Amino acid sequence: MSNQLVVVGLFACAVSGVPGLFFSRHRCTGQWIAVIIAVTGCVLGLIGIGAFWCGHDGPEIGLPQPIPPFPGAQSWVGIDGLSALFLAPIFLIALLGNVYGLTYWKQSEHPTNGRKVGLFFGLMPAGMALLVIARNSLIFLVGWEVMALSAFFLVTTEEHDQEVRETGLLYLVATHFSTLCLFALFGLLFTWSGSFDLETMGEDKAGPKEVNALYVLALLGFGLKAGLMPLHIWLPSAHAMAPSHVSAMMSGVLIKIGIYGFVRVSSLLPAPPQEWGVIILALGGISGVLGVAYAIGQHDIKRLLAYHSIENIGIIVMGVGLAVLGRSLGRPDWIVLGLCGGLLHVWNHALFKSLLFFSAGSVIHATHTREIDHLGGLAKTMPQTALCFLIGAVAICGLPPLNGFVSEFLIYLGLFRTLSPSEGLSFARVSSAVPALALIGSLALACFVKVFSAVFLGSPRSHHAAHAHESKMTMVGPMFALAGCCFVIGLLPTLVSPVLMKAAQAWAPELAESDMRLDSFAPLGWISVMGLVLLGAILLAAMLLWNRLRHRRVETQPTWGCGYAAPTARMQYTASSFAQMLVSLFAWVLRPRRQAPEALSLFPQPSSFRSETPDVVVEEGIMPTFRFGAWLFSWIRIIQQGNMQLRLLYIFLTLFFLLLWRGRP
């Protein structure tokens, strides 16, 4: 029953945007029909997942596979513990995103591209759901390509903008390189296993060299989709240019498909060498630290949130790396804490990052700008959005009593267990990831203090910010739903413990044989108790403060302006000035650019200051490579003259060299 409901749900999502193509682009009728179909499909999918968790999992569903070398064979789709965990955020965020888009990207206000968004916003989660339940590499690749191409059309929604078209091209190149890596990966799996089915390979079929090759391809193909640094080249600009509910879907769900792919493929392979766990753990730490460092220097609120996605992907990969290392060493406690912590962070990041993108979209919808330095004072005019953004900010910083704290705490516990004397000093070095994780959390806290204060506190810095208004309930409602989920997981982590263990047992079946439980290694009950105590203390303090202010006269005065006779909003701290010290600490890798005025005279002319933190990998690595490739291929075009005699000559020379090569002893 669960498999059938999920398949029906993803099919409903896939076709949800089709009816809208037959209605007027200037009316919202087609959009409403699309949303109703998509929401129905998402609800059916969530019911199917719930049925699986309750033990009502049905048989796998067979799909026809009329391709050689297996004509008449079938490709199976079905749910297990790992796929169910990833399916839940796919359907949940798609459901809330469709409702959010009714106001944010209203069809009547966007007649040129509204139907396009509706069509591909249904296809993207359908493709993701299909590949997650695929038990065959061919079906997996079909779902992967549907997801990738749908995301491309959504990123390029406003294709009339040159920057959007360049972003779409960069994303298209990156996603097709990722797909090529997956073709090679599944091709090698087929060569060594003799089947396209995603089934466990024995050590007799894959030696150390084969395992290393498969891990390299999986890390490249899935790491590029996940945005793992330095494979993140497409992610910041794509998230910034897409509509906000699309950004929430891409950041909260799509990049996690890269995590799912790597975790799924690694579960099929024999235990890797110990070095692979250390490499994955190190890549996660680097991605986390540099991701949040780049975020601090951003002025665009959506680009800032995109870099925080890279940071959180790093945290997830740290947990997965610890699990891979535990599998190599036969340490089930490392597997449970690392994998459960990483997978729980998949859920948590989907919730609070979607919440933050929805909140940022609410701000953009009201002010028509993404520039942080053009905002300010929005907590007075947009209190509900400000509250939701604050909840998301606390969650993403890993602070109790919200959900981000629980998943990071599990990874902390797993890393501290590497200090076990039985493993010797060689693996005690792995615990050096603990300071990296702590640095990520502290930098994230500083970054969101900057964002919240610059956007929601102080005085408005522009005309648009001064005349902002709160968003409608179709936008605010999904935000509060996500905020509630953040509280539920943060306060009651024992509710998700069985789900996490089912996923961990699907990755490492030996855990099911030993009947291990997550709460055997982590004090989940105490987390609930302390979280409830902390929340109660916060609510009590808020009530006392409210009661005290209610009986007093409160006067409103302008902020002290350092003695100026006529203070203005321009005298406030900007996002750039707030982050200057932290950006300078990482200047050796971030390479920030500053345009400051020269020494001022007694009677200075008007001057300006500008700072930016470009992406070094893109600006100094990828784009120069593209330019060199364009120059190189411009010379190669000389041989393409369209002359039949020259083409025959090329064929003759090719055959001649092949005969020489073949004739060598």
Image (cartoon, helix red, strand yellow):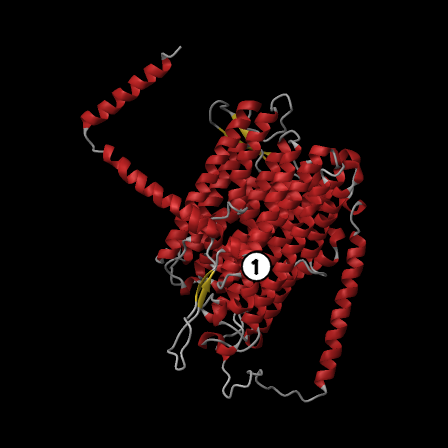
617 displayed left or right of 263: left
- Do we see residue 391 in this rendering? yes
Q: Position of residue 517 (x, y in %)?
A: 78, 43
Q: Position of residue 67 (x, y in %)?
A: 46, 26
Residue at the spot x=71%, y=79% of the render? 546
Quadrant of image for the C terminus: top left
556 displayed left or right of 535: left
In the rendered image, the residue lying farthest to the top is: 665
Query: Could you say which quadrant of the image residue 107 lies in?
Result: bottom left
Looking at the image, which is closer to me, 21 or 126? Answer: 126
587 displayed left or right of 339: left
Q: Position of residue 562 (x, y in %)?
A: 56, 83
Q: Is residue 275 above or below residue 613?
A: above
Residue at the spot x=72%, y=87% of the render? 551
For the residue labelled by badge 1, is the local secondary structure a helix, a strand or a loop? helix
* Residue highlighted by disc 1: 585
Residue type at numbered disc 1: Leu
Quadrant of image for the N terminus: top right
Query: Could you say which quadrant of the image residue 336 lies in?
Result: top right
- Do we see residue 38 in this rendering? no
* Crowd tier of the residue under label 1, counting other residues whose Cα lies within 10 Å: few below 14, some 14–19, many 20 or above: few
Residue at the spot x=25%, y=20% of the render? 652
Q: Is residue 653 above or below residue 553?
A: above
